[in-house]
Amino acid sequence: MIRTLQPGDEERLDHFLRGHADSSLFLRSNALAAGLRDEGRPLQATYVAEVEGEEVVAVVAHGWNGNLLLQARKSVGELSRRAAATTGRLIAGVLGPWGQVVAALTELGLSEAATSLRSREDLFALDLRTLRTPEPLTSGALTCHRAEAGNIDLLAGWRRSYRIETLGELDRPELLVSSRDDITRSQASGGLFVLEEEGRPVSMCAFNARHPECVQIGGVNRPGFSGDSFT
Protein backbone atom coordinates (compact mmCIF):
# COMPACT_ATOMS: atom_id res chain seq x y z
CA MET A 1 0.00 0.00 0.00
CA ILE A 2 1.20 3.50 -0.84
CA ARG A 3 0.10 6.32 1.42
CA THR A 4 1.10 9.74 2.68
CA LEU A 5 2.63 9.54 6.15
CA GLN A 6 0.95 11.57 8.87
CA PRO A 7 1.88 12.79 12.36
CA GLY A 8 2.13 9.66 14.45
CA ASP A 9 4.13 7.81 11.78
CA GLU A 10 7.47 9.30 12.87
CA GLU A 11 8.82 6.20 14.62
CA ARG A 12 7.65 3.93 11.79
CA LEU A 13 9.51 6.14 9.30
CA ASP A 14 12.68 6.41 11.36
CA HIS A 15 12.76 2.66 11.99
CA PHE A 16 12.99 2.15 8.23
CA LEU A 17 15.49 4.95 7.62
CA ARG A 18 17.72 3.71 10.46
CA GLY A 19 18.49 0.70 8.31
CA HIS A 20 19.82 3.04 5.60
CA ALA A 21 21.39 5.59 7.93
CA ASP A 22 24.39 6.49 5.78
CA SER A 23 22.22 7.63 2.87
CA SER A 24 19.19 8.98 4.75
CA LEU A 25 20.52 11.85 6.82
CA PHE A 26 18.51 14.58 5.09
CA LEU A 27 15.31 12.57 5.48
CA ARG A 28 15.95 11.71 9.13
CA SER A 29 17.16 15.18 10.05
CA ASN A 30 14.27 17.01 8.38
CA ALA A 31 11.62 14.68 9.77
CA LEU A 32 13.03 15.04 13.27
CA ALA A 33 13.30 18.84 13.04
CA ALA A 34 10.03 19.64 11.26
CA GLY A 35 7.78 16.61 11.75
CA LEU A 36 5.48 15.13 9.12
CA ARG A 37 3.15 18.08 8.56
CA ASP A 38 3.73 20.00 5.36
CA GLU A 39 2.76 23.67 5.39
CA GLY A 40 5.56 24.70 3.03
CA ARG A 41 7.88 25.87 5.79
CA PRO A 42 11.65 25.26 5.82
CA LEU A 43 12.57 21.58 6.35
CA GLN A 44 8.97 20.42 5.95
CA ALA A 45 8.00 17.86 3.32
CA THR A 46 5.26 15.51 2.23
CA TYR A 47 6.41 11.92 2.85
CA VAL A 48 4.85 9.30 0.58
CA ALA A 49 5.71 5.75 1.58
CA GLU A 50 5.13 2.18 0.56
CA VAL A 51 3.90 0.30 3.61
CA GLU A 52 3.77 -3.47 4.10
CA GLY A 53 1.70 -4.33 7.14
CA GLU A 54 2.84 -1.74 9.66
CA GLU A 55 6.33 -1.27 8.22
CA VAL A 56 7.59 1.43 5.86
CA VAL A 57 9.64 -0.25 3.13
CA ALA A 58 10.27 2.75 0.82
CA VAL A 59 9.76 6.51 1.02
CA VAL A 60 10.03 9.65 -1.10
CA ALA A 61 9.68 13.12 0.42
CA HIS A 62 8.89 16.24 -1.61
CA GLY A 63 10.28 19.15 0.33
CA TRP A 64 9.37 22.78 0.84
CA ASN A 65 12.16 23.73 -1.58
CA GLY A 66 10.97 21.43 -4.38
CA ASN A 67 13.59 18.73 -3.85
CA LEU A 68 12.65 15.06 -3.88
CA LEU A 69 14.50 13.03 -1.25
CA LEU A 70 14.65 9.32 -1.98
CA GLN A 71 15.07 6.14 0.01
CA ALA A 72 13.15 3.74 -2.16
CA ARG A 73 14.75 0.67 -3.70
CA LYS A 74 11.29 -0.25 -4.96
CA SER A 75 8.46 1.84 -6.43
CA VAL A 76 10.65 4.95 -6.63
CA GLY A 77 8.90 6.28 -9.72
CA GLU A 78 5.38 5.82 -8.36
CA LEU A 79 6.30 7.28 -4.98
CA SER A 80 7.97 10.28 -6.65
CA ARG A 81 4.93 10.94 -8.85
CA ARG A 82 2.55 10.64 -5.90
CA ALA A 83 4.64 12.94 -3.72
CA ALA A 84 4.87 15.66 -6.40
CA ALA A 85 1.17 15.37 -7.23
CA THR A 86 0.24 15.66 -3.55
CA THR A 87 2.28 18.82 -2.95
CA GLY A 88 1.58 20.42 -6.33
CA ARG A 89 5.12 21.80 -6.30
CA LEU A 90 7.54 21.75 -9.18
CA ILE A 91 10.45 19.32 -8.88
CA ALA A 92 13.55 21.42 -8.29
CA GLY A 93 15.99 18.58 -7.62
CA VAL A 94 16.30 14.88 -6.85
CA LEU A 95 18.62 13.65 -4.09
CA GLY A 96 19.35 10.14 -2.92
CA PRO A 97 21.28 6.97 -3.73
CA TRP A 98 22.49 7.32 -7.32
CA GLY A 99 20.69 4.31 -8.76
CA GLN A 100 17.42 5.55 -7.27
CA VAL A 101 17.99 9.07 -8.62
CA VAL A 102 18.56 7.70 -12.13
CA ALA A 103 15.46 5.50 -11.90
CA ALA A 104 13.31 8.34 -10.58
CA LEU A 105 14.42 10.76 -13.30
CA THR A 106 13.74 8.13 -15.96
CA GLU A 107 10.27 7.28 -14.68
CA LEU A 108 9.40 10.95 -14.26
CA GLY A 109 10.49 11.67 -17.85
CA LEU A 110 13.24 14.00 -16.64
CA SER A 111 16.35 12.03 -17.60
CA GLU A 112 17.06 14.38 -20.52
CA ALA A 113 15.91 17.57 -18.80
CA ALA A 114 18.34 20.48 -18.67
CA THR A 115 19.82 20.92 -15.20
CA SER A 116 22.13 23.40 -13.53
CA LEU A 117 23.81 20.55 -11.62
CA ARG A 118 23.92 16.80 -12.26
CA SER A 119 26.47 15.15 -10.02
CA ARG A 120 27.16 11.75 -8.52
CA GLU A 121 28.73 12.32 -5.12
CA ASP A 122 30.12 9.63 -2.84
CA LEU A 123 29.25 9.62 0.85
CA PHE A 124 31.84 8.51 3.37
CA ALA A 125 30.81 7.16 6.77
CA LEU A 126 33.21 7.50 9.70
CA ASP A 127 32.90 5.89 13.12
CA LEU A 128 34.09 8.57 15.56
CA ARG A 129 36.05 5.93 17.46
CA THR A 130 38.43 5.82 14.49
CA LEU A 131 38.66 9.59 14.04
CA ARG A 132 42.20 11.00 14.27
CA THR A 133 42.65 14.72 14.88
CA PRO A 134 44.90 16.28 12.19
CA GLU A 135 48.32 17.38 13.46
CA PRO A 136 47.80 21.11 12.65
CA LEU A 137 44.88 21.11 15.09
CA THR A 138 46.69 19.23 17.84
CA SER A 139 49.72 21.52 17.49
CA GLY A 140 47.65 24.69 17.55
CA ALA A 141 48.77 25.82 14.09
CA LEU A 142 45.08 25.81 13.20
CA THR A 143 42.07 26.24 15.45
CA CYS A 144 38.46 25.24 14.87
CA HIS A 145 35.45 26.65 16.69
CA ARG A 146 31.74 27.21 16.28
CA ALA A 147 31.00 30.27 14.16
CA GLU A 148 30.05 33.42 16.04
CA ALA A 149 27.59 36.16 15.11
CA GLY A 150 30.52 38.35 14.10
CA ASN A 151 31.47 35.85 11.38
CA ILE A 152 28.14 36.00 9.54
CA ASP A 153 28.91 38.71 6.97
CA LEU A 154 32.16 37.04 5.90
CA LEU A 155 30.69 33.54 5.79
CA ALA A 156 27.61 34.70 3.87
CA GLY A 157 29.92 35.89 1.11
CA TRP A 158 31.72 32.55 1.11
CA ARG A 159 28.38 30.73 0.98
CA ARG A 160 27.26 32.84 -1.99
CA SER A 161 30.47 32.02 -3.90
CA TYR A 162 30.11 28.33 -3.04
CA ARG A 163 26.58 28.23 -4.42
CA ILE A 164 27.68 29.88 -7.68
CA GLU A 165 30.80 27.75 -8.21
CA THR A 166 29.57 24.41 -6.92
CA LEU A 167 25.78 24.39 -7.28
CA GLY A 168 25.59 26.36 -10.53
CA GLU A 169 23.33 29.08 -9.15
CA LEU A 170 23.06 32.47 -10.84
CA ASP A 171 24.73 35.47 -9.22
CA ARG A 172 21.68 37.57 -8.44
CA PRO A 173 21.20 40.10 -5.59
CA GLU A 174 18.82 37.78 -3.77
CA LEU A 175 21.49 35.05 -3.69
CA LEU A 176 23.50 36.96 -1.09
CA VAL A 177 20.35 37.54 0.94
CA SER A 178 19.41 33.86 0.97
CA SER A 179 23.05 32.88 1.62
CA ARG A 180 23.06 35.15 4.67
CA ASP A 181 19.81 33.54 5.83
CA ASP A 182 21.43 30.08 5.43
CA ILE A 183 24.46 31.12 7.45
CA THR A 184 22.40 32.84 10.14
CA ARG A 185 20.22 29.75 10.68
CA SER A 186 23.22 27.44 10.70
CA GLN A 187 25.12 29.64 13.15
CA ALA A 188 22.13 29.93 15.47
CA SER A 189 21.74 26.14 15.50
CA GLY A 190 25.35 25.63 16.61
CA GLY A 191 26.11 23.59 13.52
CA LEU A 192 28.46 25.99 11.70
CA PHE A 193 32.23 25.82 12.22
CA VAL A 194 35.16 28.05 11.27
CA LEU A 195 38.80 27.05 10.81
CA GLU A 196 41.32 29.78 11.67
CA GLU A 197 45.01 30.26 10.98
CA GLU A 198 46.73 32.83 13.15
CA GLY A 199 43.33 34.20 14.11
CA ARG A 200 42.18 34.60 10.49
CA PRO A 201 39.20 32.57 9.20
CA VAL A 202 40.36 30.39 6.31
CA SER A 203 37.60 27.78 5.93
CA MET A 204 34.16 26.76 7.14
CA CYS A 205 31.93 23.72 7.22
CA ALA A 206 28.53 22.85 8.60
CA PHE A 207 26.30 20.05 9.73
CA ASN A 208 23.87 20.06 6.81
CA ALA A 209 21.87 17.30 8.49
CA ARG A 210 21.89 16.01 12.03
CA HIS A 211 20.29 13.32 14.13
CA PRO A 212 21.04 12.21 17.70
CA GLU A 213 22.82 9.15 16.26
CA CYS A 214 24.91 10.87 13.57
CA VAL A 215 25.58 14.06 11.62
CA GLN A 216 26.39 14.84 8.00
CA ILE A 217 29.09 17.36 7.09
CA GLY A 218 28.51 19.47 3.99
CA GLY A 219 29.34 22.80 2.47
CA VAL A 220 33.06 22.57 3.23
CA ASN A 221 34.27 25.85 1.82
CA ARG A 222 37.41 27.92 1.66
CA PRO A 223 38.00 31.05 -0.44
CA GLY A 224 39.25 30.34 -3.93
CA PHE A 225 38.26 26.68 -3.75
CA SER A 226 34.94 25.12 -4.70
CA GLY A 227 33.58 21.78 -3.63
CA ASP A 228 32.92 19.67 -0.57
CA SER A 229 36.51 18.69 0.10
CA PHE A 230 38.97 18.51 2.94
CA THR A 231 42.57 19.72 2.72
Image: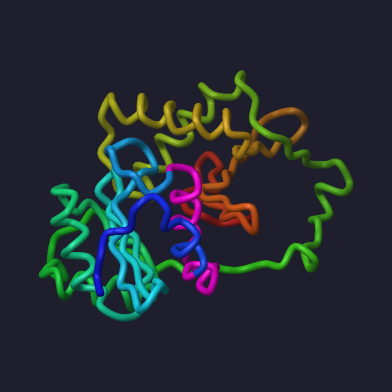
Name the main secondary structure of what is drawn in magenta. helix
**Quarter of the view holding residue 151:** top right
Left or right position of 71 against 201: left
**Quarter of the view holding residue 129:** bottom right
Q: Is residue 123 magenta?
A: no
Name the one closer to the observer, 179 or 50: 50
Which residue is situated farthest in the top direction here? 150
Residue drawn 75% across and 28% down? 199
Q: Quadrant of the C terminus?
A: bottom right
Reply above or below: 145 against 10. Answer: above
Residue drawn 74% across and 39% down? 144
Reply above or below: 98 against 33. Answer: below
- Residue range corresponding to the magenta coloring: 16-34
**Image coords of residue 209 (percent x, y):** 52, 50
Left or right position of 7 against 210: left
**Quarter of the view holding residue 22:** bottom right
Reply above or below: 127 against 149. Answer: below
